[in-house]
Each structure stands twice: as structure tokens, then as C-alpha cells.
Amino acid sequence: MTSTGAELDITGRISNRLSVSANYSYTHAIVSKDSRKKTKGINWHSLLNR
């Protein structure tokens, strides 16, 4: 399997008692060798807010 992607993390402090963070990731994976039927590729997005 071959994969490429990117990640982005942002963190901020709104006040002394409150902080915010957001995370985003993108992965593009390709099955490079498989004995079964060929698969073109998989795009996967992930967004997480805390």
C-alpha cells in the first residue's frame, strides 16, 4: 500500500480558562500490490474538533 497525505493542527487560547483546538487530516491510499481485483484508491478525510 502506498499513501500520501497532510495534517493540520490549530490551537488557540480564548481566555485563561478556555482553549480551542481543531485537527484535520487527509490521506490518499493506493493498494500497490494485491492478489485480488485491483482497487483504484481510497481518499479519507478526518475532521476533529475538541
Image (tube, grey):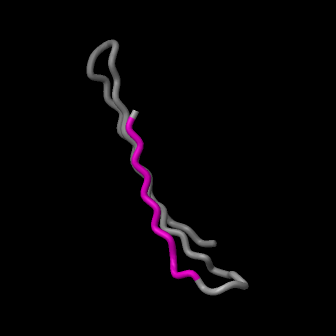
Q: Horizontal and vertical percent for residue 5?
A: 47, 62
Q: Horizontal and vertical percent for residue 43?
A: 46, 67
Vertical placement of residue 22 versus 4, above or below? above
Q: Horizontal and vertical percent for residue 3?
A: 55, 68
Residue visible at 46% across and 62% down in the picture: 44
- Near-viewer residue (2 or 37): 37
Residue visible at 48% across and 62% down in the picture: 27
Q: In the displayed structure, does residue 23 sit left or right of residue 4?
A: left
Q: Main secondary structure of the magenta part?
A: strand
Judged from this view, the residue extending furthest toward the left is 14
Q: Horizontal and vertical percent for residue 42?
A: 50, 71
Vertical placement of residue 19 versus 36, above or below? above
Q: Is residue 43 magenta?
A: yes
Residue visible at 43% across and 52% down in the picture: 46
Judged from this view, the residue extending furthest toward the right is 35
Which range is magenta? 39-49
- Near-viewer residue (47 or 7): 47
- Near-viewer residue (28 or 35): 35
Q: Quadrant of residue 17?
A: top left
Q: In the displayed structure, does residue 10 sit left or right of residue 35?
A: left
